[in-house]
């Protein structure tokens, strides 16, 4: 990339919107790991991403003092507004980007939730379909879609949606297994065993399906403490499923995994 091209692709557009620049190199392993994630998130946050190979553009790398790669910078009004060097896990990268742009997935899911709360399931369905078309492998879109169908007891559609994901990488495998456990929970809600803990179990399950995860964790944790044998250790299994859905880096996963360990041992 020439300095003129950099000005045309980065500096001038940055006066209208933030522009991401990823300084990278072909020989850099972390660069190759970061690039697809950064590309995915740039699309989600509607931020242009410009890749600059420091070996092909040494003058630009020198001008901006690039010493190590990957070196990611966000430009606004022709200047570097922020930067980081090295790898960031996805949650931190999302947090960093959220300072400058809005996730189109977050915005879309908010619209879905508003439609559901307003009693307009057909609108929520259309919004979810549009999100799936644009972000077919986004974890939160997958989760919201399946939760939407599970709450409506549309088991066939939910399973048909999950089955192709079964052959994906390990992260999707765990998510699919967790969502199938969520389906089992919903099916169990309507089955009363006349056990005194049934009502608490159903309340925790409904909270999980509605995305009120802190409430769900509290409910399931209380059941673990009261009776491990209830529904064949169902409350603990439900918590494990929610950990997989939220991911290991989620604050609630960290908090309640520790509390679950304390309750078990």
Image (tube, grey):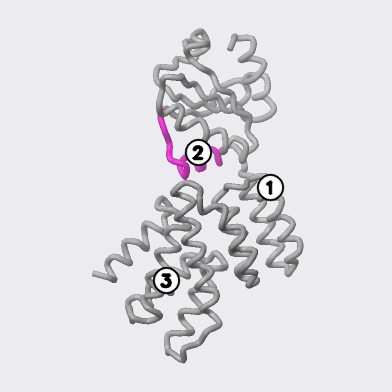
Q: Residue at x 47, y 70 (%)?
A: 216
Mark 3 or mark 2, earlier in chain: 2
Q: Residue at x 60, y 53 (%)?
A: 141
Picture coordinates of residue 72, whole percent (x, y): 49, 27
- Label disc, if present, on residue 133 of the rendered structure: 1
257 on left or right of 20: left
The residue that disc 3 covers is: 218
Q: Is residue 238 above or below residue 73?
A: below
The residue that disc 2 covers is: 96
Q: Is residue 135 above or below residue 62?
A: below
What is the magenta range? Answer: 86-99
Q: Residue at x 68, y 47 (%)?
A: 133
- Label 3 and label 1: CA atoms lie apart by 35 Å
Q: Secondary structure at mark 2?
A: helix
Mark 3 or mark 1, earlier in chain: 1
Q: Is residue 92 magenta?
A: yes
């Amino acid at each position: 990339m020439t300095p003129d091209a950099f000005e045309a692709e980065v500096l001038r557009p940055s006066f209208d919107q933030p522009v991401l620049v990823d300084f990278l190199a072909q020989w850099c392993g972390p660069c190759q790991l970061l690039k697809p994630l950064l590309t995915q998130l740039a699309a989600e946050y509607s931020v242009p991403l410009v890749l600059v190979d420091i070996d092909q553009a040494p003058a630009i790398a020198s001008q901006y003092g690039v010493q190590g790669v990957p070196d990611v910078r966000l430009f606004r009004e022709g200047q570097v507004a922020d930067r980081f060097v090295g790898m960031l896990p996805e949650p931190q990268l999302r947090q960093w980007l959220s300072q400058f742009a809005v996730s189109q997935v977050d915005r879309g899911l908010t619209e879905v939730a508003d439609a559901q709360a307003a009693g307009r399931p057909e609108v929520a369905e259309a919004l979810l379909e549009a999100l799936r078309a644009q972000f077919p492998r986004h974890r939160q879109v997958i989760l919201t879609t399946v939760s939407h169908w599970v709450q409506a007891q549309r088991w066939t559609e939910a399973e048909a949606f999950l089955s192709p994901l079964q052959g994906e990488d390990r992260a999707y495998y765990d998510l699919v297994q967790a969502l199938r456990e969520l389906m089992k929970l919903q099916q169990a809600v309507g089955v009363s065993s006349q056990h005194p803990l049934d009502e608490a179990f159903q309340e925790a399950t409904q909270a999980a399906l509605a995305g009120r995860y802190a409430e769900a964790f509290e409910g399931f944790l209380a059941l673990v403490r009261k009776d491990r044998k209830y529904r064949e250790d169902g409350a603990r299994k439900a918590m494990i499923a929610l950990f997989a859905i939220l991911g290991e880096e989620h604050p609630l996963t960290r908090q309640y995994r520790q509390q679950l360990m304390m309750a078990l041992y």
